[in-house]
Every structure is written in C-alpha cells, then in structure tokens.
C-alpha cells in the first residue's frame, strides 16, 4: 500500500507539528488508510488545530461547483473554518494570526483546472508574504504521473481554473507542483513536502491500495477522474456534462441531440481506448434539469492509451456538428471573464477552431512540442521515480 504524507506524519513525523499552532487546509477526501479524516488524525497525533481552511466545495465538501462558501465555525471542534472559495481566495493576515504552521492535505485529480491547485498557489503566495511555513502532505495523482496532455495557458487567460501554465494533464502530484510554483513564481515560501512512500509514477489510484473518497461532489469515482480531463470541456457549452445524474462527466447530452447518431459518429473515429454508447437521461440539477436528454456515455476500454483531453474535443465537435444551430459555447464563466471554455482550454484558439469546423487533429497538432518541453521543465521538481 502507498503511504501518504498524512500517514507518515502521524506515524513517524509528529515532530513536525509538535508544539505548533496548526492551520489545516483540507477537504473530506484527505483521509488515512483506515478512513479517518485528516483533522481527526492530526488531533490524535497531538496537533493543536487553531484554524481550518476549506477550498472550493468547502471544508465539508458539500457545496456545489462554483458556489461561494462562507466562513464558519466547526461544530465539533470549535475551530474557525475559513473559506478560501468565497470573498477571499488567499488567507488574510487575520486568518493566520493564530497559526505557526500551515498544513495542506488535499486529494487532487491530476488536472490543471481542478481548483485545489489554485488554492495551493494562493497558500504559497500567502506564506511567502507572511513567513509562515507551509507543510504539504503529498497524495497520489490518481490518473498516473506519466501521461502529459494538453495545451499551455496563454497570457491573459490565467484564472482559478488555470492558475499556472502547465498542460491540462500534467502528471504531477500537488507536492511536486508546490515546489514548481514556489520556484517559478518566486514566492519564497518556507515550503516542505512530506512525500509518499511506495508511489510510482505509473500507478493509477486503484493500484495504490488506498481508499477512494470523492474529492468533490462531481467526482464520485476514479472513472470520473479518468475522463474528466477532456469531458470537463462540456462545462463551457450548453450541453449537459451529466451533473445531476449518477454519471457526471461520463455522459454528455442535450434535448436536441440524437444519441444513436452521435455514438455512431464518435465510434467511427476509432479513438484509442474508448467506445461510445447512446444514452437517454434526465438531469435532476444543473443544465437541462428535468428535461429528457439524449447523448452518449464514454466507456474506457484502455485507460493507458486513451487521450482524455483530445477525446473531450472530439465529443464537443461531434455534438456541434450534429446540430450547429442549437449548440452553443457559453459566453462567460462564473469568474465573469472570457468564455468558460477558453479558461478551461487556456486559449481561445480551440473554441474558435471548433466554430470554424476545423479537424481536432489540426487543433492539437502543436501540443506535442509543448508537452515535451514541459516534461523537461517539471524534472527538477519531481519526487518519485518514473519506473513502472
């Protein structure tokens, strides 16, 4: 079994927290191997928790995607719970007034636009500003640490769903990314990363021996995270990405689509590692709530050969081609800036190319050079072997 940073802290490195007032930044998926929450495990290990911090979805993980979260008081522990996804994204001096050490422990999904990375970015900036040290307890990249796929974030399109210029699938852990951000952004934070033991870059989460806990309401299973790097593009359109169903991001559809025709069109592309099945569904929430939709479900046949980001673009292109008059890209984001699709992609080129009917291969042909450059760029910050 892989041993996470949290597991090692409570079993072997209690010295790192002894006698210090701890500010814990976490969410419900940060558990021990026997499913104890990070806050409870730390308290049992002797930690004094003086402040708690929650990311998007909140400290308890119950808030919907994009929903602002208010500050609160933890009902059981009595400690203040500061939201880092509300009026503030970065801890203020007042929030940190009773903190000697910030401890960050979150389960990521290995994708650039999953916002726990952005919360980490702002923590590092705050620690550089205040001098408060930051300890990152590392966890696996659940979709492996080898595969890299996707375009860069172009200047001017940085956002909370694209805080730094890295590929959509970056193949790094949050501990490794903390080191990259601190160095490249020159934050100067007093950063320490407690690395995992036993994790290899080739591992998917179900090969780690660790229990899967949904890291957010829309990420119920590992298969969700597997298709998410490309299927999240659906968020930037008027298609349903399956929110309000039991298969978020695995299914896509709309009231005006023909699911059978869509599956035939996508399967004719013979994309590696996936097949498409026509589906009917009625979302209970989010886009097209309460309306009958048709579309497809993405079935992964070989997760090591599939190109998840590219698959998402093919799905968008096929849906638009079937009914270009009804299909639409959303004009804005909950960030109130450029179209949400552009923020997810990191550029406007993909959306503009899809509108013009360009072939997906044409839109992605320049990714390989950037991906190769990033593979070299990330090397100084890697903590784990490439060996399979």
Image: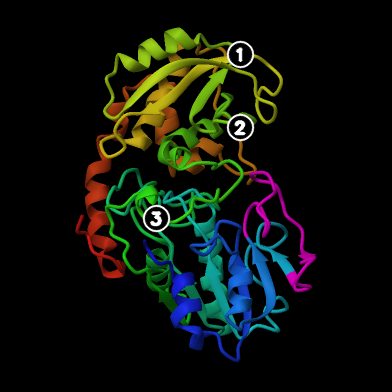
Mark 1 or mark 3: name the one nearer the start of the chain.
Answer: 3
What is the C-alpha distance between the residues marked 1 and 3? 41 Å
Q: Mark 1 or mark 2: which is in front?
A: 2
Judge whether residue 188 can be spotted in this image. no
For label 2, the crowd category at 10 Å Cα-Cα, with few meaning under 14, some 14 to 19 and many 20 or more, is many
Mark 1 or mark 2: name the one nearer the start of the chain.
Answer: 2
Look at the image and tell me in which quarter the C terminus lies.
bottom left
Q: In terms of depth relative to the viewer, which is nearer, 361 or 200?
A: 200
Residue 312 x/y as whole percent: 41, 31
What is the C-alpha distance between the residues marked 3 and 2? 28 Å
Question: Which segment is the magenta one?
Answer: 55-80
The residue shown at (41%, 21%) is 317
The residue shown at (31%, 65%) is 198
Judge whether residue 12 can be spotted in this image. yes
Residue 61 among magenta residues: yes
Marker disc for residue 209: 3
The residue shown at (73%, 78%) is 94
Above/below status of 348 relative to 74: above
Marker disc for residue 243: 2
Residue picked out by circle 1: 255
Residue 215 among magenta residues: no
Q: Mark 3 or mark 2: which is in front?
A: 3
Q: Main secondary structure of the magenta part?
A: loop
Quarter location, residue 305: top left
């Amino acid at each position: 079994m892989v041993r996470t940073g949290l597991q090692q802290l409570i079993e072997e490195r209690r010295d790192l927290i002894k006698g210090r007032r701890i500010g814990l930044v976490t969410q419900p998926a940060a558990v021990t191997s026997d499913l104890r929450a990070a806050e409870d495990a730390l308290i049992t290990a002797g930690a004094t928790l003086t402040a708690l911090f929650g990311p998007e979805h909140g400290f308890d993980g119950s808030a919907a995607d994009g929903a602002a979260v208010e500050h609160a008081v933890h009902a059981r522990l009595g400690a203040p719970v500061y939201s880092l996804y509300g009026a503030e994204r970065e801890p203020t001096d007042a929030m940190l007034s009773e903190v000697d050490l910030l401890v960050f422990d979150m389960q990521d999904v290995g994708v650039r636009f999953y916002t726990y990375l952005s919360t980490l970015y702002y923590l590092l900036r705050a620690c550089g500003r205040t001098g408060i040290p930051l300890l990152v307890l590392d966890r696996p990249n659940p979709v492996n640490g080898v595969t890299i796929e996707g375009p860069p974030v172009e200047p001017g399109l940085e956002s909370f769903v694209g805080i730094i210029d890295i590929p959509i699938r970056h193949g790094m852990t949050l501990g490794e990314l903390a080191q990259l951000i601190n160095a490249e952004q020159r934050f100067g934070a007093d950063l320490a990363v407690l690395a995992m033991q036993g994790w290899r870059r080739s591992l998917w989460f179900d090969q780690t021996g660790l229990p899967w806990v949904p890291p957010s309401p829309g990420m119920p299973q590992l298969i969700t995270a597997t298709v998410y790097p490309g299927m999240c593009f659906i968020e930037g359109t008027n298609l349903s990405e399956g929110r309000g169903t039991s298969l978020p991001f695995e299914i896509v559809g709309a009231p005006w689509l023909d699911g059978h025709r869509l599956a035939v069109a996508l399967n004719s592309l013979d994309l590696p590692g996936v097949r498409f099945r026509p589906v009917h569904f009625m979302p209970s929430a989010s886009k097209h709530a309460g309306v009958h939709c048709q579309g497809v479900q993405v079935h992964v046949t070989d997760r090591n050969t599939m190109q998840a980001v590219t698959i998402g673009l093919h799905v968008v292109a096929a849906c638009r081609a079937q009914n270009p008059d009804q299909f639409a890209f959303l004009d804005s984001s909950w960030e109130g800036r450029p179209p949400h699709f552009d923020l997810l992609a990191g550029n406007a080129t993909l959306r503009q190319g899809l509108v013009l009917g360009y072939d997906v291969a044409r839109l992605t042909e320049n990714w390989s050079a950037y991906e190769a450059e990033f593979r070299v760029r990330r090397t100084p910050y890697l903590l784990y072997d490439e060996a399979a």
